[in-house]
Amino acid sequence: MTGTSDGQRFSEPGKDADVMAAWERFLNGSGQAGDALRSLVEGSWQRCRDHNVDPDKRSAPPPLTESRLESLRNTHDELLRASAPIMACARDFLAETGTVMALADVNCTILSMEGDTRTLGAAENIHLLPGVAWSERICGTNAIGTALAVGEPVQIHSAEHYCAGIKRWTCSAMVIRHPIDGETLGVVDVSGLSETYNRQSLALVVTTANRIESRLTMRETELRLRLLEAALPNLSSTTDSVVLFDRRGYPIKANGNAQAVLASLGADLDLSRPRRIPALALDNSLTQLPPWMRAEWLAPVSERGERIGTLLILPLPALVHRRSKPDREEIERPPGGFEHIITVDPGLKTVLRKARQLASSRVPVLLLGETGVGKEEFAQGIHRASPFSAGPFVPLNCGGLSRELLASELFGYVDGAFTGARRGGLIGKIEAANGGTLFLDEIGEMPMDLQPHLLRVLEHGEIYRLGENAPRKTDFRLVAATNRDLRQEVAAGRFRMDLYYRVAVTSIRIPALRDRQGDVERLVQHFLAHFAERHRKPLPVIDHAVLERLTAYTWPGNVRELRNVVESMLLVCEGPRLSLDCLPAELEADTPTTPDTHPASVTPLHAVQRISEVEAELIRRTIAATGGNLTLTASKLAIAKSTLYQKLRDYDLHDEVSAQRSLKLSGQR
């Protein structure tokens, strides 16, 4: 698959007549397509001609029968579950734009649709329906089929469609990839009649695909925890050498001797850099096992009668071929783990040196810093450079969860512990982190009545699942993080002093992006290269004026916000350069975060006397900057969403939210 070489990401409605003329010339072979036609579209038309697609086709083929569609949906149950709430949220918004959103599988067959009712009716005329395959081979150039063909975001408008019957439509699509290995799972598409064309539709499908991938990541974590729990007795064996594979054939856990035994067998499998073995996927047969592997070494891992993974139990005789001593370079390998953190700032380099030193110990570490500075990146680095690096890294965000949900996530529960408890119980994150690292983000938001239970685990190395009387031994490295001042939380009675001194044996303060000299430019170049490769786009040149604007911005959302801005700029801009026109709205002009800037409608902070007024004004500004998006507002303010709602009530700011949302909506129209 190749990316778009000319950087033309968007259709141009003003060139419809020229594109139509190019289509007619293309069909009769009377000349070149011309400058009006994007190379992406021309390449698709060429594939359509190679596949003998009928350019006079008026619609897609009829849909599958209901029973076959239901069977197909069952096959793609995880993808549908991950996308359902996201597509449901888009339902009302799409109704106002006259468009529909479709989710299709990797064969371009539509699985589900949401959106404007009238547009859904019009879509029936061309069979834009669940159960219909919209591949290029069948329906010619269209966003669904072309996005899957090229593996990048695609927008196809009006005359750019290959088949005559679809030229009244405009559509944008983006592929959905598996979070572990990037395997293409499907595509999300937004379509409407030609008059609904909007360049932002492409950004919408990219965002939607990213959100679906995030939900798939959460689901993957849950499945792996279940698999680890089911396989725990085998993995605890001191006599067998065992490797555990998930349902897709990925190795996710091994006991201490496994790597040495694999080496003695000549296996091309490095457990420190795991790769998928397709033959061990549950939907494959075992006819194509690697040459070094035998079927009799494999055992299924089941939970309540359902197979969820595979154990590779290696033969004991292979242990005699193991080297009696490890290589010298393995013994003296320097501590790593932080290579993924990019910086030229002397202050952050000092912080990294401290993190490397602390990583070699086993004591808890508390990471301090604003939202978005990269606390989880540091936690992963500490894990990889620690004595627990061979074990799992298990993250859990303590903010935004109810007391009951957080308790079950942390400690797990036994079968029948409470009404609605999952049959067979649940392994908690603390237990799942045994032998590895537990990362507790936003630990300052942990309810007071749960804190003594965590303290007991840290002091005694024992955990009780909810509803259980017998303790379970556990040994893990704790890395905690917070954007709060825990000393003040202790003084205010919201955090236990004894727990504070237990989790803050050592602490690391990560500087905000605005305090890291030279890092903005370095990170911009890094993220541009990363997203250009991910979206299969040519690497653009960024104007100096853009770098100046990005460097001057104070980045309240830190590295996370910068990453999102760079990806948005790359997708929205066309051509080989990123200019000031590519900047998002909040960076196009002086922003509320610039210290010497005070919009006329907002009172300067230096003129406010009381703390409550300062806080209310800051919330008001952030609501304005985010267009009334409360999730983003809470993130930028580094507070929980529930706290934000309380402050909206305290300062009577609900009208401000409604006004900003109305303003944003009118701007979109």
Image (cartoon, helix red, strand yellow):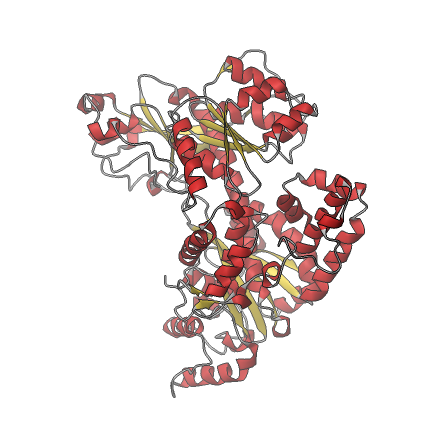
Asked whether 513 or 372 is in front, the reply is 513
Query: Can you say whether 106 is above or below 492 in the image?
Result: below
> Which residue is at 22% across, 25% downward?
326
Whole-percent x and y of residue 317?
Answer: 21, 21
> Which residue is at 53% across, 12% downward?
471
Query: Can you say whether 371 is above or below 571 in the image?
Result: above
Query: Can you say whether 279 is above or below 166 in the image?
Result: above
Whole-percent x and y of residue 59?
Answer: 54, 71
> Which residue is at 38% across, 23% downward?
235
**Quadrant occupied by the C terminus:** bottom right
Asked whether 628 or 435 is in front, the reply is 628
Whole-percent x and y of residue 624?
Answer: 70, 55
**Quadrant occupied by the N terminus:** bottom left
Whole-percent x and y of residue 164?
Answer: 52, 78
Residue 309 shows up from this direction: no
Residue 242 shows up from this direction: yes
